[in-house]
Amino acid sequence: MSKRIVVTGGGGFLGSHLTARLLDEGHHVICIDNFFTSSERTIEPFLGRPGFELIRHDIVEPVFVDEVDQIYNLACPAAPGHYQYNPVRTVKTSVMGVINMLGMARKTGARIFQASTSEVYGDPEISPQRESYRGNVNPIGRRACYDEGKRAAETLFFDYHREHGIEIRVARIFNTFGPHMHPFDGRVVSNFIRQALAGDDITIFGEGDQTRSFCYVSDLIDGFVRLMNADDFTGPVNLGNPQERTILDLAEHVIELTGSSSRLVRKPLPPDDPVRRCPDITLATERLGWKPTVGLREGLEATIAYFAGLDLSEWTPPTPYWEAPPVA
Ligand code: NAD
Ligand code: UDP
């Protein structure tokens, strides 16, 4: 049956894929976005499509939409360079913004999904990370506005659930990549592909032996929809690809698949950069029947093809990365 579904952050990387999937399934999608870290270009294909509505709005300010069945709360800057650009705003988005969206869920009776993150584990002392692990976050570091904001958001979700009986779903998302990533978001996959296609130096932060586990976007979105529609399961649940890779390994894949002659250059490691990150997805497999199906090479090929088709002059130039914001 067709549902009325709010997607905050619907103009972003993950939000645009989710919106496409929900529209294809015949749902009515109300996208709420202020386009802080995305471009309206990403949602152009949806404009004029039956069932799509756009509300240009910052979720830090109250907003109300009537008759909502489901809310996916994705609005939040996600790339380190984006969330550290205006850290206080990042915390507000994860606290005041989340309270506003939980308020909408309370008034409408909608089920609400939170895009949480592997960053709640911080720089983990155990690997792979299970949902029962409580994490190792530096509360005063440069990543804290995001990590602690997302942790507070999880707290709010569970308190609204216990106190007001709201139906919640919490996904802890691990690094995801694919078409529609902002080419200048500063994240490792977008940086490496953009650099390789241009023949520029590929920037390895630190020694490149830190690990991440890269999930292709279509797999992740499938996990979102399964979790949202699962019975009696709040999460939190890890969603990510358990194949752990070093950053050097990723760079080598990108060079090979683009046929680039780019050189690898070392840059300083950003503060508090997690050394390892790998999801234990046992819970997602048991409760949602979910596991990723797209391998790194296949996903990179699709992402490289997307980036190769972009006219970069149409996109906003790079946002400052970690060294750029003024020291407080
Ligand atoms: P993105 O930056 O591409 O998308 C975020 C969207 O939210 C953008 O369209 C942005 O304009 C919007 N937004 C930001 N602040 C807002 C505000 N206050 N009000 C309204 N809109 C606002 O990032 P993404 O990769 O698509 O991430 C989506 C969500 O998933 C985020 O909550 C992020 O924390 C979470 N997540 C993503 C990843 C990943 O690997 N992509 C990993 C972990 C968690
Ligand atoms: N990284 C890198 N070169 C870049 C961008 C990122 O080596 O040009 C590293 C970064 O230091 C981190 C990893 O790649 O160890 C993933 O960074 P990203 O910003 O994509 O996301 P994170 O997982 O750190 O939030």
Image (tube, rainbow, N blue to C red):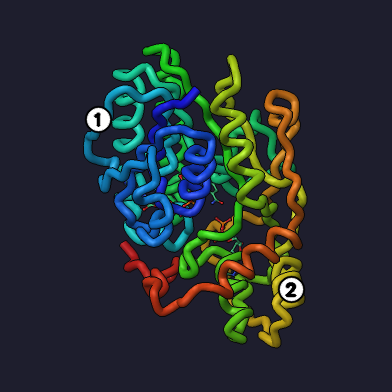
* Secondary structure at numbered mark 1: loop
Q: Is mark 2 within 8 Å of ligand 2?
A: no
* Secondary structure at numbered mark 2: helix
Residues tagged 1 and 2 counted as in contact (Cβ below 8 A) = no
| Residue linked to disc 1 | 64
Q: Quadrant of the image for the C terminus? A: bottom left
Q: Residue furthest left?
A: 62
Q: What residue do we see at 66% from left, 63% from top?
A: 302
Q: What residue do we see at 59% from left, 33% from top?
A: 134
Q: Quadrant of residue 196?
A: bottom right
Left or right: 189 as drawn, with respect to 92: right
- Dot 2, crowdedness within 10 Å: few (<14), some or many (≥20)? some
Residue 188 in view: yes
| Residue linked to disc 2 | 257
Q: x, y percentage for residue 88?
A: 31, 50
Q: What residue do we see at 33% from left, 55% from top?
A: 35
What amino acid is labelled 1 in the image?
Phe
Q: Quadrant of residue 99?
A: top left
Q: x, y percentage for residue 143?
A: 47, 53
What amino acid is labelled 2 in the image?
Leu
Q: What residue do we see at 38% from left, 34% from top?
A: 6
**313 above or below 40?**
below
Q: x, y percentage for residue 40?
A: 35, 58
